[in-house]
Image (cartoon, rainbow, N blue to C red):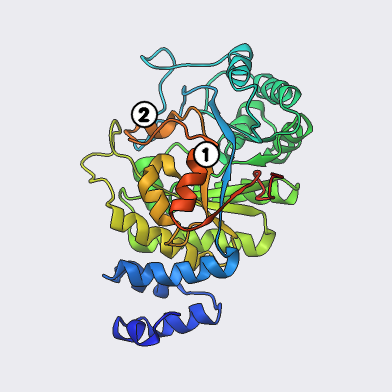
Amino acid sequence: MLNAGWYENLGLGEIYGKVQGAERLSLEDGEKLLACPDVVAVGALAHHVRTRLHGQAAYYVLNQHINYSNICINGCLFCAFGRVKGESQAFQLSTEDLLNKLKEREKEPITEIHIVGGCHPDLPFSYYESILREVKAFRPSAVIKAFTAVEIAHFAKQTGKSTREILLRLKSVGLDMLPGGGAEVFSPRVRSLLCPHKLSGDQWLAVSREAHELGIRSNATMLYGHVETPRERLEHLDALRRLQDETGGFVCFIPLPFQPANTRVGKVEPTTGVEDLKNMAVCRLMLDNIPHIKAYWVMLTVKLAQVALHFGADDLDGTVVEEKIGHMAGAESEQALTRPELERLIRDAGFQPVERNSFFEKVAD
């Protein structure tokens, strides 16, 4: 049981009451939580909510990440992944290359294929349709989670078609779900500083709304720890929960700590473990209508992701296999985890491991 007096002494008595009554927190409540010096107190509130929703379950997925290209026209300052065509370290996979990556893991019972890349200047839309067809043919029972809202809008601009038509065409050839990337922080101020050529926050939300209306569910992210203010973080979370009130289409939220290495943001100190844990907890408390919160071990490190299960997170993501985006920005985590490793991490943290698919449906033992 949480101690009401503890929260009264911290000036969080009203927030404690709201959490106990499952009431929605305001942006001002979120500011108080982010400013609270007692990370354990904030974490305990989030753990209370997490336990109410999921008990002792902690989820993981057997998945494979594939980045088809890092060639990108956006030039975001925070991105260590993107390259200009012809630049050193720029790459683009052919459909055959992509299939070879799938074949390398053919014997593994993978249930999710996660495909994202840069906004390539001249790949034809038929390339993306071909990717999905081939992956679905090779892994017919796997969920294909592919192309962020940013990529969807890029395809629409290139082809002169609407984002709705792009989504329908991709759905017809195998797209099951959208990943949550590209959201960054929705604040126009932040985007004008760090990614002025990228899809705006409102446009990202609009594409997600269309996907949900078409029966394509999605995830959502927030990249934090660069130039955003605490209020801008909270406004980002509020925009997501308002869209979720409207559509119910978000499955999982993933807070992503900014990795400053090899980026052009300037002198920004990496987030600390305390900041990451407090942010995780506040995300769980603010996003009362998004069922799952992911501790993405690739960006957090495995050990901190384990602790985050006590600060509101209920998911560790999965095997991943080959991750490029975070590691090119200096992520120090492993490239892949096995099912036994994931289950051990979860059990050692005091939770019950549950293998899931992309929609958090339990995979049969």
Q: Which residue is mark 2?
A: 328
Secondary structure found at label 1: helix
Residue 87 spot, x, y in % from top left: 38, 15
In the foreground, 291 or 71: 291
**Which type of secondary structure does the marked residue at label 2 adopt?**
helix
Q: Position of residue 228 (x, y in %)?
A: 34, 54
Towards the viewer: 108 or 231: 108
Asked whether, in this view, residue 298 is left or right of residue 248, the answer is left
Question: Taking the image as drawn, is residue 318 in sight?
Answer: yes
Residue at 31 percent across and 67 percent down: it is: 39
Residue that label 1 marks: 340
Q: Quadrant of the C terminus?
A: top right
Kind of residue at badge 2: Met
Give residue 331's quadrant in the image. top left
Up-down: is 102 above or below 165?
Answer: above
Q: Is residue 31 visible?
A: no
Residue with the most extreme right position: 172
Q: Is residue 196 above or below residue 187?
A: above
Give the alpha-carbon distance from disc 2 to disc 1, as whole Å.
26 Å
Image quadrant where residue 64 sits:
top right
Check residue 308 in the rendering and tell me which mark sits there, or answer none.
Answer: none
Tell us which disc is closer to us: 2 or 1.
1
Q: Is residue 110 above or below residue 183?
A: above
x then y, percent, for residue 340 = 52, 39
> In the drawing, does residue 274 fall left or right of residue 242?
left
Answer with left or right where residue 80 lies relative to residue 251: left
User: In x, y percent, where is residue 146?
Assistant: 62, 34
In the image, what residue occupies the spot 47% across and 22% down? 71
Disc 2 or 1, which lies upstream in sequence? 2
User: Callout 1, which amino acid?
Assistant: Pro
Asked if labels 1 and 2 touch by Cβ distance under 8 angstroms, the answer is no
